[in-house]
Image (cartoon, grey):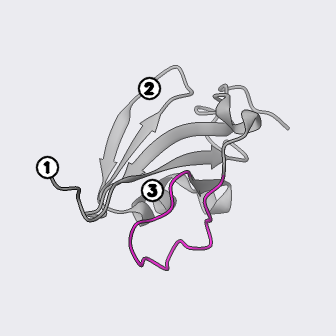
Amino acid sequence: MSQPAHLPHRFALHRRYDLTGISGTGLVAYGTQYPSGRVTLAWCCSDIQSIAVYDTIDDIERIHGHGGLTEIRWIDPPNHADTTHNDLTPTALTSEHTRCATAKQTA
């Protein structure tokens, strides 16, 4: 079986401040961007866990970015020549980021 030309790559959604009080701060979701550009986002750290599908990574930033209070941290580097998000260099998730956030707001 041949390998696909491009593999999906993973990211984590890291929230510095929770405007809604629902998802909390820190690591709040994991996502996968597929070669088609479509994205899945799995919320992992609130009482209600869900998985959603978006057309682009830009949709994730527009909807969940809260004006820069939440950022995408790549776990795997992009597989294509997309320069839009190259400033979001792959970040190893240290123990600080592997814990799920709680809905309680931190300072």
In the rendered structure, find residue 60 and report the number of the disc placed on it: 3
Task: Give the foreground label among 3 and 1.
Answer: 1
The x, y position of residue 25, in whole percent, is 69, 38
Q: Residues within 10 Å of mark 1 (few under 14, many from 20)?
A: few
Gap in angstroms between the C-alphas marked 1 and 2: 35 Å
Task: Say which element carries label 2.
Answer: loop
Dot 2 corresponds to which residue?
A: 49
The magenta region covers 75-91
Task: Say which element carries label 3.
Answer: helix
User: Decide: marks 3, 2 in contact (CB < 8 A)?
Assistant: no
Q: Residue furthest top?
A: 47
Please report whichever mark, 3 or 2, sits nearer to the chain's N-terminal start.
Answer: 2
Task: Give the foreground label among 1 and 2.
Answer: 1
Q: Residue 57's quadrant in the figure? A: bottom left
Gap in angstroms between the C-alphas marked 3 and 2: 17 Å
Identify whether 107 is placed above or below 3. Answer: above
For the residue pair 4 and 68, the one nearer the viewer reads as: 4
Residue at point 62% right, 56% down?
71
Q: Amino acid at mark 1?
A: Met
Residue at point 14% right, 49% down?
1
Left/right placement of residue 55 relative to residue 57 reads left
Task: Let me know if residue 38 is in the magenta part.
Answer: no
